[in-house]
Image (tube, rainbow, N blue to C red):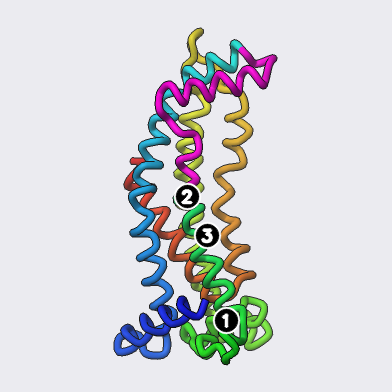
Amino acid sequence: MSVFADLVERLADLLQPLFHASAAAAAIILFTALVRLLVHPLSRAAARGQRARAALQPKVAELRKKHGKDPGKLQKAVLELHAEEKVSPLSGCLPSLLQMPAFFLLYHLFSNSTIGGERNGLLTHELFAAPLGGRWADALGDGGVFGGAGLVYLGLFAVVAAVATFNYLRTKRMTATNTLLPVADGGEQVPGLAAAGKVMPFMPYLTLLTVAFVPLAAALYVVTSTTWSAVERAVLYR
């Protein structure tokens, strides 16, 4: 973890002439962008995989109709279909999974008072008036909602809410299209998709809880990555 701390400090030093006291926060945003650039090829592959899975939905619906009373046989048939068409049902999970180590590194880095037995100097850095190692509860206890640190969190919440609303509208539009896919007899709804479609559009709003409870540095990673994802998916899945 000390190597990662040195990387953040070096990035902060490079950005200090531009961002001054908020250089470490800018370094975290830059680090997040670099992580997302590295993962981008997998995101493109996931987009291709989703389009391929969408094209298979009529065949999947036929299999559900044929083997609906035998879940084991249905699962085997669906897996065989994906294998035959060379489509991985898990490809969309890889970009998110590969980002998790970076998030947890930031979380632990800004949650510990010491690194390698020495004082954690990164905890002295701030984003405007909010310490990067602090949480929303700390901001509420030090100035309240409209205090210096509280306003930083209000800004982050506003960004997250805007991105979540964008994702909500986009997901709702996509699920509305995908829940009524054609099947062999001409128009039966794919089982299970309607229920999932009611829940999925609201999932992006859970990011608000993450931002509220993790250290500010980790929250910056989440906000930056979520915003990147929204733009990336709008381009790749258009």
Disc 2 target residue: 167
Q: Which of the marked residues, 3 or 1, is nearer the chain's N terminus? A: 3
Structural crowding at the residue carrying mark 3, measured as other residues with C-alpha within 10 Å and reported as few (<14), some (14–19) or many (≥20): few
Residue 91 image point, x, y percent = 45, 40
Work out whether 205 lies above or below 215: above
Instruction: Please state if 171 lies on the left or on the right of 27 as rendered.
Output: right
Work out whether 143 lies above or below 157: below
Q: Quadrant of residue 15?
A: bottom left
Q: State the CA–CA distance, disc 2 to disc 3.
A: 20 Å
Amino acid type, mark 1: Gly
Instruction: Check the picture and name the quadrant holding the C terminus.
Output: top left
Instruction: Tell me which segment is drawn in magenta.
Output: 67-94
Q: Which mark is residue 160?
A: none
Helix, strand or loop status at disc 2: helix
| Nearest to the observer: residue 172 or residue 130 | 130
Disc 3 target residue: 100
Q: Quadrant of residue 236?
A: top left
Structural crowding at the residue carrying mark 2, measured as other residues with C-alpha within 10 Å and reported as few (<14), some (14–19) or many (≥20): many
Helix, strand or loop status at disc 1: loop
Residue 192 image point, x, y percent = 62, 28
Helix, strand or loop status at disc 3: helix
Amino acid type, mark 3: Met
Disc 1 target residue: 133
| Nearest to the observer: residue 152 or residue 61 | 61
Residue 163 image point, x, y percent = 46, 57
Residue 97 image point, x, y percent = 51, 53
